[in-house]
Image (cartoon, rainbow, N blue to C red):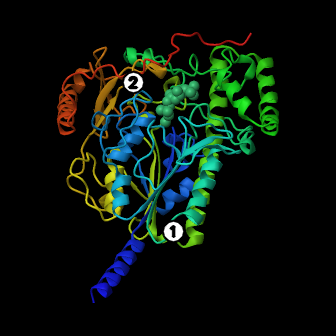
Amino acid sequence: MIKKTLTLSLALASSLLANKTNILFIFSDDHATQAISAYGGRFAKVAPTPNLDRLADEGMLFKRCMVTNSICGPSRATILTGKYSHLNGFMVNEKTTFNGAQQTFPKLLQKAGYETSIIGKWHLGSKPTGFDHWDILPGQGMYYNPDFDSPQGRSRVEGYCTEVVTDKALTWLKKERDSSKPFMLMVQHKAPHREWSPALKYLNAFDDVKMPEPSSLFDDYEGRGKAARNQDMSIDISMELGKDLKVKEFDKKGHLAGRIHKRMTAAQLKAWNAAYEPKNQALLEAKPQGKDLIRWKYQRYVKDYLRCIKSVDDSLGQLLDYLDESGLAQNTIVIYSSDQGFYLGEHGWFDKRFMYDESYRTPLLIRWPGHTKEGSKTSKLVSNLDFAETFLEIAGEEIPSDMQGASLVPLLKGEDPKHWRKSHYYHYYEFPGWHMVQRHEGAYDGRYKLMYFYDIDEWELYDLKADPEEMTNQFNNPEYSSVLTHMKQELQKLRSQHQVPKNKIKDVSNPSQKYITNHEAEVIN
Ligand code: SGN
Ligand code: CA
């Protein structure tokens, strides 16, 4: 009798498990919302994103998904833990390793009977915990013929990183997972991270297109502070013709371009040279200077960036097709996001880190058949802080009280929760560091944004309704004094709600890294 009951309850448990929603999380690195057609920005007509647009058409597009700290490792740590950097301990890239002993959503899903897997970029230093399967790129990973680390050690795979990661994910889904269990798979691309190296088959995509320029490409930072003025992330000065823009002759240091070339096979290198050399030759003959050279750099940069996106979009397409073919689509929630946004020439920049909109906002598209209305959009303030709680609620699990976000499930179901957050807290910590962005914190309420660069004691206030490009700092404008008072209160409230330490956080920069600053813009002689 006991045996029979046990068998029955085991059968019940396994059928309950089989009915649980699968979670497919597809994540890229540095993908700006401007570069997704469905977001309707500057590149709406040229962004090569039919599959991302399909996800938006079949699910929900989040217009305001804000990150807690606009940089890779910290964003990933926030996603895993549902906590801000000061509580999960991972505040800057690469200085420390992520403490994998702490509570994370994959661990909780594992306990709930999910099979958990991560494939691709990890960038948290320590080995993944809470995953039944992991196969990750060491560090930043390489675009061509990437290495992977797994419990079996390191191995190199010939091919283009985005495609290799996709193949690995498909193999795991088709052949390796335990199909009696629900799955949570994180497919995490390196692309479109710097130095924006495309798949060989896309090296000539967009050759005949003139990419639209942002109106702030030649921003003079008037009215803004030292942080915006003194960064090291301008297309003019900081973007290198050799390493970043693949004009070999101009690689003064020779490191990255050289590294890529050494890794490529002879056939790959041949295709690479065949694509870039004629275009480079044209540049060398035209010898653009000053603003013309910045314009040329911008075009090369954005085209390579969008070429990388093309492969990310293909990857999503292949995964969506597999869900359809296998019959898994109906019972799988698909999430697309990125570790943060990126500057595609706005303010004259590339890279991220600032709380200004283009890098503070990250894409978020979610398809949840049977629950989320197709083609829906929301302007509610959401965050990568919310992902962990969302996944737990979808899995029917309890949400630990120490997580700091909110489950997105009510929004996904089309509800209008009364007590949704009215403002969002941001904090960036890495200075000195790559691109020399001052540490700052701030509050954003969907219209007004208050930023405080505390090491240099400078404040900035923006009204994004009147000034979506954040060109006019209203901090000293008396007309905004009540807004300022309100936003300062809001910032204080958020700091205490999220247990931000009262004392100024000590310098947490990475002393082992060398930062290039104040170099001069390259010219073509
Ligand atoms: C590398 C890049 C930087 C980039 C950081 C962080 N330099 O160091 O431009 O800001 O990664 O990026 S590179 O010369 O190596 O390309 S992150 O996505 O990992 O946060
Ligand atoms: Ca990133």
Look at the picture and state if 214 lies above or below 386.
Answer: above
Residue 410, quarter of the rendered image? bottom left
Q: Quadrant of the C terminus?
A: top right
Q: Which mark is residue 430?
A: 2
**Residue at 72 percent of width and 43 percent of height:** 202
Residue 330 appearing in the image: yes
Name the disc covering residue 376, or none: none
Q: Is residue 375 above or below residue 459?
A: below
Spot occupied by residue 278 in the image (x, y as percentages of width and height) = 82, 29
Amino acid at dot 2: Glu
Relative to 204, is 393 on the left or the right?
A: left
Q: Which residue is mark 1?
A: 329
Task: Give the label, 1 or 2, closer to the camera.
Answer: 2
Q: Position of residue 381 (x, y in %)?
A: 32, 46
398 w.r.t. 65: above or below: below
- For this view, does 3 lie left or right of residue 173? left
Residue 258, x across and y down, in percent: 70, 24
In depth, the one of 138 and 455 nearer the eye is: 138
**Residue lying at 50% horizontally and 67% vertically, measured from the top left:** 178
Mark 2 is surrounded, within 10 Å at the Cα level, by few (under 14), some (14 to 19) or many (20 or more) other residues, namely: many
Residue at 27%, 15% in the rendered image: 457
Circle 1 Cα neighbour tier, 10 Å, few/some/many (<14 / 14–19 / ≥20): some
In the image shown, does 461 or 5 lie closer to the viewer? Answer: 5
Mark closer to the chain start, 1 or 2: 1
Q: Residue furthest bottom?
A: 1
Q: Closest to the observer: 150 or 70?
A: 150
Cα separation between marks 1 and 2:
40 Å
Tell me whether the residue at label 1 lies in contact with that at label 2, contact meaning CB atoms closer than 8 angstroms.
Answer: no
Tell me: 523 left or right of 8.
right
